[in-house]
Image (cartoon, rainbow, N blue to C red):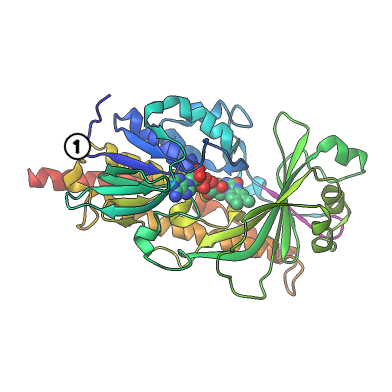
Amino acid sequence: MESTKDFRVAIVGGGMCGIACAVGLAAKGIRADVFEAAPAFGAVGAGVGLGPNAIRALEGLGVLEAVMGKSDTKEPTLRSFIFVSGPGQHEVIYDYSKYFGQYGLGIYRPAFLEALLPLLDPRHLHLNKKCTLVTSLASGSYKLHFEDGSTHETELVIGADGVKSNIRRSLVGNSPSNNLVFANTVAYRGLVPHSTLVKAGITTNVNGMPLCWMGRDKHIITFPLSGTDKINVVLFASNYSQPMSPPREGPWVENVPRSEMATTYEDMGGDAKIIIGHLDGTSKWYIHSVNPLLTSYVSGRIVLVGDAAHAMQPHLGAGVGQGFEDVYVLFRLLAHPSTQRSNLDASSTQTTLSVYDKLRPRRANMVLEASARAGRIFDGFGKPGCDAEWARRELAGIWEPVWNHDLKQEVDEELTKLDKKHTANL
Ligand SMILES: Cc1cc2nc3c(=O)[nH]c(=O)nc-3n(C[C@H](O)[C@H](O)[C@H](O)COP(=O)(O)OP(=O)(O)OC[C@H]3O[C@@H](n4cnc5c(N)ncnc54)[C@H](O)[C@@H]3O)c2cc1C
């Protein structure tokens, strides 16, 4: 099908944000070529939780139904946490769901991609294409350079290439860190059969609502994987005694033995230790985030979405949700009938990409900072002055700004302004 626009679109990165973007645009007749570095889509898998704002963004993109078909549950479920004390008897500190019950989804990354990839024309999906550089051409187009020596020309580059983004370099220049820091936080991820925990004598109900076990410089997240006997476990450990470090040079994900966790979590209570003692193979993730924050996600006609723009700590489960919001805003702006090559560029105000840049860094950076703060709260329990009362105060409404935001209205208002401008220019 011929594209409805007079510009070509290249999406670098075929993760959840890149593919959601390609599908949304394709449904509006805007063809995009997707370039993915890996030899297959969804090669790296992990589960993510999507809050109500992420659900609305997917709905706006027209992909929610397809995604729901592959989610952990066939309809949105209550998505909030019961906070319990990590040490001691695991008393309930705060039941977030009682106050702010909201609906969302859990989905496995490869399942998300499996749901959406069939909606795309395979002729425009390119694997083994690691983009190393973007250069500008005299024609005003861009040239993407790939590791295998090939190139591709386009007028709009969407950088959806994740936390280690090469496209970010087009915005931040030769910053040696690529505006990334290691957050001095690691996350151990593993699974454990619920029946095994019961046999081992666990008394905390880990098979109902997600739990956050709060500790000192550490916390544990547990939730059941719907339709299975498995409990998903993510154990965070942070070092707050030093400033954030430069990005790690070794691998950011590695397999580690269970014994590595035993010392870190030795001050946790009995049920937490039962969980740790029965985890299947565990991987250790070094958590990186964008820092310093990007004040702009756009340069010319190069635009960042998802982790490429705002990789954040995962404590509010909000990273990919912000990516879906980026993609929804970009999709609405690009799909607008008056959007053409001449009014894409962000160099003047009230153009497509300048509107994107007006809306997205402000909100996604706010969520990035709120996520870091949430980590400090979850890891604060038991520090001087940080008792259950303190925790309840700090936790109240913590997800509200993330979940309750009327993105559609925000975009509608901006499109009305763009319409007025275009009418005035006729
Ligand atoms: C422990 C942990 C738990 C998390 N939990 C949640 C959660 O519950 N909820 C939530 O919303 N978020 C969560 N996140 C964050 C979430 O995983 C990310 O925000 C999300 O995966 C970002 O999607 P993306 O498409 O922007 O990037 P990615 O998923 O990283 O995809 C980028 C793609 O680009 C490809 N690529 C990279 N470089 C290049 C290149 N140069 N050229 C071509 N292709 C390239 C990669 O191979 C990859 O396929 C969590 C993160 C972690 C680490």
Which residue is at a point 52% across and 33% down the rendered structure image? 113
Residue 101 is covered by the magenta coloring? no
Q: Is residue 322 among the parts visible in the rendering?
A: no
Q: Does residue 170 appear left or right of residue 237 in this picture? A: left
Q: Does residue 99 appear left or right of residue 383 in this picture? A: left
User: Is 325 rendered above or below residue 111?
Assistant: below
Q: Secondary structure beneath disc 1? A: loop
The picture places residue 145, in percent across and down from the top left corner, at: 35, 49
Which residue is at a point 50% across and 54% down the rendered structure image? 163
Q: Quadrant of the N terminus?
A: top left
The picture places residue 408, in percent across and down from the top left corner, at: 37, 42
Which residue is at a point 19% across and 41% down the rendered structure image? 340
Which residue is at a point 58% across and 70% down the rendered structure image? 245
User: Is 83 rendered above or below residue 206?
Assistant: below
Q: Does residue 166 appear left or right of residue 277 in this picture? A: left
Q: Is residue 74 among the parts visible in the rendering?
A: yes
Residues 146 and 124: in front is 146
Residue 88 is covered by the magenta coloring? yes
**Most distant residue in the left direction:** 426
Specify few, some or many for label 1: CA neighbours under 10 Å numbering under 14, 14-19, or 20 or more. few
The picture places residue 249, in percent across and down from the top left corner, at: 59, 63
User: Is 137 rendered above or below residue 328?
Assistant: below
Specify the amino acid type for callout 1.
Asp
Task: List the residue tagged with mark 1.
Answer: 6
Magenta range is 81-89
Which image quarter: residue 101? top right
**Most distant residue in the front direction:** 149
Residues 369 and 250: in front is 250
The picture places residue 268, in percent across and down from the top left corner, at: 83, 59
Q: How many marks?
A: 1
Q: Quadrant of the C terminus?
A: top left
